[in-house]
Image: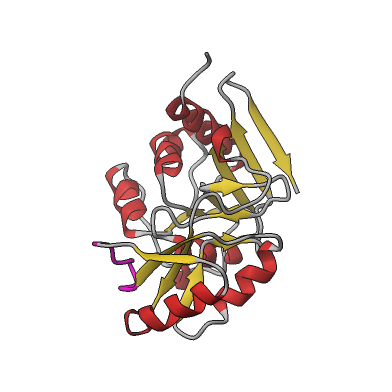
Amino acid sequence: MGIDAAAQKQLAARAALAFVKEGMTLGIGTGSTVDAFIEVLAEAPRAARHVASSERSAARLAERGFDCVGLNDTDGLDLYVDGADEYTERFTLLKGGGGAHVREKVLAAAARSFVVIADASKKVDVLGAFPVAVEVLPLARSAVARKLAALGARPDLRTGFTTDEGNLILDCAGFAITDAAELERDICALPGVVDCGICALRPADVILAAGPDGEVIKLVR
C-alpha cells in the first residue's frame, strides 16, 4: 500500500534540505509541502536571509525563529523552494491552489536555482487537470472572465478569497494546454490579469518527487 501523501511530502521536503547552503539567500514558497519544508528547515545549514512568498509562509517561518526580508532588500535569491499543484517531466508547473502564485513566480524568476518539492500524485503528462488560477484586478474581473472564456476556459470566481496583493482569483477549468508557454503568455497579456498559475516560461530546475514506496526521485533540467 505504501506511505500516504502527507508522508511523501515530508520526504520530498527533507530531500530539499541538501540544497540549502550556509549564508545563502533562500526563497520559500507556499503550501502544504512547503509547510513540511519549514518544519525541518532548522536541520539545514543556516541561510543568511529568508524571503517568503506569502504572509502565511512568513508567519510560519517567524514561529520557528526565522526572520524574513523583502525581495527588494536582496540582489536576488540563491535558491527558491516551492511546491506545485501539477508538474511534468518537461519541468513545467501549475501553481495557484493556495492563491500565492504571483509572488511565487516573482521569487522563482529572481532565483538562480528553483527546486520544486512534491508528492507523486502531482505528476501529469499534460498540465490542466487542476484549474488554472488567474489573479485579476477586482475592477477587471468580469472583462477578464469573458476573455478567458473566449480562450476556451470556464472561469469561476474563487469566493471569499483575496490574495496578499488585494486581488481576486478566477479558477479556470477546461483549458487544452498543448503549449504551456504560449498559453501563459496569452493569459498574462490580457489587460487586468496580474499573472496566472502556469509556470512554463520559468520552469523548475530540479523536481524532488516522493512516491508511495518512500523513494524520492530527483529530476534535473
> How many numbered marks does the figure carry?
0
Q: Is residue 103 above or below residue 125?
A: below
What range of the chain is rendered magenta?
A: 160-167
Please, what is the dominant secondary structure of the magenta stretch?
loop
Residue 202 image-quadrant placement: bottom right
In this rendering, is residue 123 above or below 25?
above
Residue at x 60%, y 56% (from the top left corner): 78
Residue 21 visible here: no
x, y percentage for residue 146? 45, 79
Residue 106 rendering spot, x and y as whole percentages: 52, 67
For residue 150, what is the image quadrant? bottom right
Please identify the residue farthest to the top as the structure is shown: 1
Q: Is residue 202 left or right of residue 30?
A: right
Q: Residue at x 68, y 70 (%)?
A: 182
Query: In the visual, does 208 lie left or right of 1?
Result: right
Residue 27 position in % (x across, y down): 50, 55
